[in-house]
Image (cartoon, helix red, strand yellow):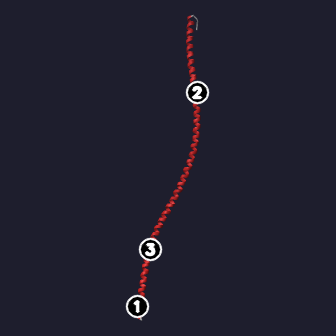
Amino acid sequence: MILILIAAVVGFAIVFENKFKGISIDYENKTKQLEKITAKAVSEEAKSQQIYEIKENLQKDKETLEQSYSSISKENSDLKVELESLKSELYAVKSQLADKSGKLGLLESRYNEVQSSLVNANDQVSWLSFKVKELCGKLENAGEEC
């Protein structure tokens, strides 16, 4: 009976040891799998953090670009208004210039007429002066005073 008992205890010990080895090996395998999964999760978390930072940077860049676009768009609009104003002013100045050019042409033609009249008058004065001298010469020859 003692031998049976010892054999039963040894049998239980062997079965228990085999079960314990199986559980131990299973535990080791599960631990290795858990470590791989943990490493993968840490890697994924790092990637997720990088993606989050990239998204944040993109959002900030987008806001900056939108502000720049808005500013440039307003400046463009202001420049268009100023351009239209300058075009109107240029048109008015061109109109004034055309008017002044017309008046200048008229004054030049009047100047040319007056100058021509003056030349004719000078010619007449010269001719009359010559006639006066001629007549004075005839009067002096006739004994008269001029």
Between 58 and 13, the residue placed more toward the observer is 13
Q: Position of residue 20 (x, y in %)?
A: 43, 82
Query: Residue 107 got which mark?
Result: 2
Q: Which residue is mark 1?
A: 7
Q: Position of residue 15 (x, y in %)?
A: 42, 86
Q: Position of residue 22 (x, y in %)?
A: 42, 81
Residue pictured at 57% horizontal, 46% vertical = 78
Q: Tell me the element at label 1.
A: helix
The amino acid sitting under disc 2 is Leu
| Number of other residues with Cα within 10 Å of mark 3, as a class: few under 14, some 14 to 19, many 20 or more | few
Between 14 and 85, the residue placed more toward the observer is 14
Q: Quadrant of the C terminus?
A: top right
Query: Residue 33 got which mark?
Result: 3
| Circle count | 3
Between 17 and 130, the residue placed more toward the observer is 17
Cβ atoms under marks 2 and 1 closer than 8 Å: no
The amino acid sitting under disc 1 is Ala
Q: Tell me the element at label 3.
A: helix
Which of the two discs, 1 and 3, labels the residue nearer the N terminus? 1
Residue 125: quadrant of the picture: top right
Residue pictured at 58% horizontal, 30% vertical = 102
Residue pictured at 54% horizontal, 52% vertical = 69
Whole-angstrom CA distance, mark 1 to mark 3, is 38 Å
Q: Tell me the element at label 2.
A: helix
User: In the image, which is nearer the foreground, mark 2 or mark 1?
Assistant: 1
